[in-house]
């Protein structure tokens, strides 16, 4: 699902922050 991909990207961005 698209949300699944967005969730992973958000987690990756949060990790960088």
Image: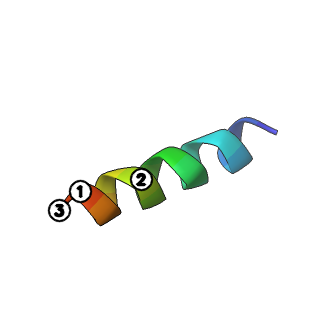
Few, some or many C-alpha atoms within 10 Å of disc 3 (few <14, some 14-19, many ≥20)?
few
| Residue 7 placement, left or right of 10 | right
Element at label 2:
helix
What residue is shown at x 45% (from left), y 60% (from top)? Answer: 11
Q: Residue furthest left?
A: 17
Please give the name of the residue rendered at 72% of the width and 49% of the height, measured from the top-left corner: 4
**Nearer the N terminus, badge 2 or badge 3?**
2
Q: Is residue 1 left or right of residue 16?
A: right
Looking at the image, which is closer to me, 15 or 2? 15
Asked whether the beta carbons under mark 3 and mark 1 sit within 8 Å of each other, the answer is yes
Q: CA distance from mark 2 to mark 3?
A: 9 Å
Q: Circle 2: is it few (<14), some (14-19), or many (20+) Cα within 10 Å?
A: few
Query: Which residue was labeled with disc 1?
Result: 16
Q: Which residue is mark 2?
A: 12
Residue occupying the far front of the picture:
16
Image coordinates of residue 8 in percent, x first then y, are: 57, 51
Q: Secondary structure at mark 3?
A: loop
Where, quadrant-wise, is the N terminus in this rendering?
Answer: top right
Structural distance between the alpha carbons of marks 3 and 1:
4 Å
User: Which secondary structure lies at badge 1?
Assistant: helix
Q: Badge 1: few (under 14), some or many (20 or more) residues near its Cα, within 10 Å? A: few
Mark 1–mark 2 distance (CA, rounded to whole Å): 6 Å
Outermost residue to the right: 1
Q: Residue at x 17, y 62 (%)?
A: 17
Q: Are marks 1 and 2 in contact (CB under 8 Å)?
A: yes
Q: Is residue 9 left or right of residue 17?
A: right
Give residue 17's mark.
3
* Residue 5 screen position, x and y as percent: 65, 40
- Residue 15 in the figure: left or right of residue 1: left
């Amino acid at each position: 699902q698209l949300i699944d991909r967005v969730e992973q990207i958000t987690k990756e961005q949060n990790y960088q922050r």
